[in-house]
């Protein structure tokens, strides 16, 4: 395990956002004594490491360094409150960093303008928390802030004096067009740490200092790891068998690993559910109480208000070498040749992972969806034999994708599926099957307006983690359906492809579509608008009538955005 230590005075938060000038890349922001400073990742020594270690990917990753850049040039009427930020999280729907300060929630947009979302920063920590909308809401002493998975949703925890000492309130933050509402979800004991797992869509929090729970909507929670009372840390193959003693912070990577600061220990709850204590030597001035996973996979750890930022590089040896971390993380950005020359044990783990994905994919059968009511005698294969629910695509649609099917706008296609897998991998189905809805236990679930081929790709993603090769014409339907089914990882993956493929001749149509698609595509729309602003002359030259179409079909909000 390799660690780089940066001297950073009064560090309060670390968050990543898309780089405004290059949305396909990420920018890490550090909130500290100097303001909001970008963390500059350097590659010094990369070539030497590659030559000296025979291209060893671990050595190449170790060559990465980091340094603090100069503070951002902020504007807005509340920039002076940046020095009081307690927590921050990126919200892709608004393409802004949401910041919690005593008394209020603030937003930092892509142009580095700071505005008030809810509450009043003048009230400070003396404010008693109160649910409400905009300036009617009250935020007292914020602790942690995390993305919520659903469009425009975040979760805030804050010290809860009303409920007694050492308690904290978990509050849902809902961002709507020009408005922000807060609603208290539950009260918990302990530090109030919370994290969104981007792989599973779960919101995890330390319900007590010795246990981790998963939020169930509308209100409720279920235990995920640990027990209510424990004095000794214990690892386990199942998370509920593990023991924690003093949970201080949680962080999750894109592969579903959840990292846990448990007293002076750094532990990981793998995607399969086991808990392992990592071998590391914390610095003598440790006492960390904050942690986040950076876009490059490193852990950033610090103490709130402390004077150093620790960047920890995790390798296979620290994660046990037996599949605690997926192959693509352990190998890093190395070439396929490095993977091909790995040890035999690593190859076996890779085959095991591929085999599991293949087995789950086999449960889907060979269908790409069958016509409902067709003459094929029903579904066949392993998936159909074990299926306990059928998902219907195109039901109730009036031409939204049914034409591709060759059967007209009312074409319906059915997909045999499995409740357990859908609920485990997709928040939409988890809430549907667990809730008291009329169709919670129905053998058929209809998705009106969903294109069959898009649903097939989304189901492949749910079962195997890979939606398959998506044709250009399928990107928009898949992005819309992924957003509808609360799968932000897939939605953002497809949105990134849409951004990369946009041209001056197609950007107007792409913006009009993203604008119609709603709040879930807000982040994509901002990136498309930035591209349009940078290529306005080319758009006028290559897309005859494009500007007129934009004026006639664009919403007032889109036009205001482009004219700002």
Image (cartoon, rainbow, N blue to C red):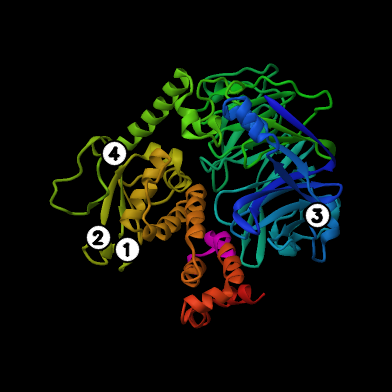
Mark 4, mark 2: which one is toward the viewer?
Answer: 2
**Residue 387, labelled with which disc?**
4
Residue 42: x %, y % from top left: 70, 41
Screen quadrant of the N terminus: top right
| Secondary structure category for the residue under label 4 | loop
Q: Determine whether label 2 and label 3 are within 8 Å by CB.
A: no
How many angstroms separate mark 1 from mark 2 (CA)? Answer: 8 Å
Question: Which is nearer the N-term, disc 1 or disc 4?
Answer: 4
Residue identified by numbered label 3:
103
**Residue 401, labelled with which disc?**
1
Q: Who is closer to the viewer here, 41 or 221?
A: 41
| Secondary structure category for the residue under label 2 | helix
Mark 1, mark 4: which one is toward the viewer?
Answer: 1
Q: Determine whether label 4 and label 3 are within 8 Å by CB.
A: no
Residue 466 vertical position relative to residue 80 in the rendered view, above or below: above
- Picture residue at 51% right of the left edge, 47% below the top: 489
How many angstroms separate mark 2 from mark 3 (CA)? Answer: 54 Å
Question: Which is nearer the N-term, disc 2 or disc 3?
Answer: 3
Residue interval drawn in magenta:
516-526
Residue 549 vertical position relative to residue 74 in the rendered view, above or below: below
Residue 266: x %, y % from top left: 68, 25
Mark 2, mark 3: which one is toward the viewer?
Answer: 2
How many angstroms separate mark 1 from mark 4 (CA)? Answer: 25 Å
- Count neighbours of disc 1 (C-alpha within 10 A) and say few if under 14, some if 14 to 19, many if 20 or more: many
**Residue 405, labelled with which disc?**
2
Residue 342: x %, y % from top left: 48, 23
Res 57 → quadrant: top right
């Amino acid at each position: 395990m390799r660690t780089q230590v940066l001297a950073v005075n009064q560090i309060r938060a670390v968050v990543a956002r898309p780089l405004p000038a290059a949305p396909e890349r990420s920018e890490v922001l550090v909130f500290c004594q100097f303001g909001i400073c970008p963390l500059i990742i350097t590659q010094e020594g990369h070539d030497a490491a590659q030559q000296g270690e025979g291209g060893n990917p671990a050595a190449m990753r170790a060559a990465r360094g980091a340094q603090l850049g100069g503070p951002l040039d902020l504007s807005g009427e509340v920039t002076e409150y940046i020095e009081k930020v307690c927590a921050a999280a990126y919200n892709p729907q608004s393409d802004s960093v949401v910041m919690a300060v005593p008394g209020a929630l603030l937003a930092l947009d892509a142009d580095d303008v700071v505005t008030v979302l809810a509450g009043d920063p003048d009230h400070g920590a003396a404010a008693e928390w109160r649910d409400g909308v905009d300036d009617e809401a009250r935020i007292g002493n914020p602790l942690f802030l995390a993305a919520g998975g659903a469009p425009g949703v975040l979760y805030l925890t804050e010290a809860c004096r009303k409920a007694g000492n050492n308690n904290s309130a978990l509050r849902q933050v809902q961002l709507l067009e020009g408005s922000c509402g807060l609603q208290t979800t539950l009260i918990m004991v302990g530090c109030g740490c919370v994290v969104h797992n981007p792989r599973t869509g779960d919101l995890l929090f330390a319900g007590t200092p010795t246990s981790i729970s998963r939020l169930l909507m509308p209100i409720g929670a279920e235990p995920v790891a640990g027990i209510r009372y424990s004095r000794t840390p214990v690892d386990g193959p199942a998370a509920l068998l593990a023991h924690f003693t003093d949970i201080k912070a949680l962080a999750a990577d894109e592969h579903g690993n959840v990292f846990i600061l448990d007293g002076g220990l750094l532990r990981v709850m793998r995607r399969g559910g086991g808990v392992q204590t990592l071998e590391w030597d914390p610095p003598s001035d440790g006492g960390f109480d904050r942690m986040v996973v950076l876009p490059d996979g490193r852990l950033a750890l610090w103490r709130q208000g402390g004077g150093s930022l620790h960047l920890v590089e995790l390798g296979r040896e620290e994660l046990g070498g037996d599949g605690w971390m997926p192959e693509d993380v352990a190998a890093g950005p190395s070439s396929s040749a490095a993977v091909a020359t790995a040890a035999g044990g690593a190859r076996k783990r890779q085959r095991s992972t591929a085999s599991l994905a293949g087995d789950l994919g086999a449960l889907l059968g060979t269908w790409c969806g069958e016509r409902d009511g067709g003459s094929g005698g029903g579904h066949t294969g392993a998936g159909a034999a074990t299926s306990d629910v059928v998902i219907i695509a195109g039901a109730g649609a009036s031409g939204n994708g049914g034409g591709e099917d060759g059967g007209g706008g009312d074409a319906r296609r059915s997909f045999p599926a499995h409740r357990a897998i859908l609920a485990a991998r997709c928040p939409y189905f988890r809430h549907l099957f667990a809730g008291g809805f009329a169709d919670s236990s129905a053998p058929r679930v209809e998705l009106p307006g969903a294109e069959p081929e898009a649903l097939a790709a989304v189901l492949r993603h749910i079962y195997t983690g890979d939606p398959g090769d998506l044709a250009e014409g399928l990107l928009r339907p898949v992005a819309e359906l992924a957003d509808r089914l609360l799968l932000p990882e897939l939605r953002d993956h497809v949105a990134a492809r849409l951004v990369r493929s946009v041209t001056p001749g197609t950007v107007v149509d792409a913006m009009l579509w993203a604008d119609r698609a709603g709040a879930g595509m807000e982040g994509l729309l901002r990136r498309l608008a930035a591209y349009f602003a940078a290529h306005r002359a080319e758009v006028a030259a290559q897309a005859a009538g494009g500007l007129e179409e934009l004026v006639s079909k664009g919403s007032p909000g889109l036009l205001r955005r482009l004219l700002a």
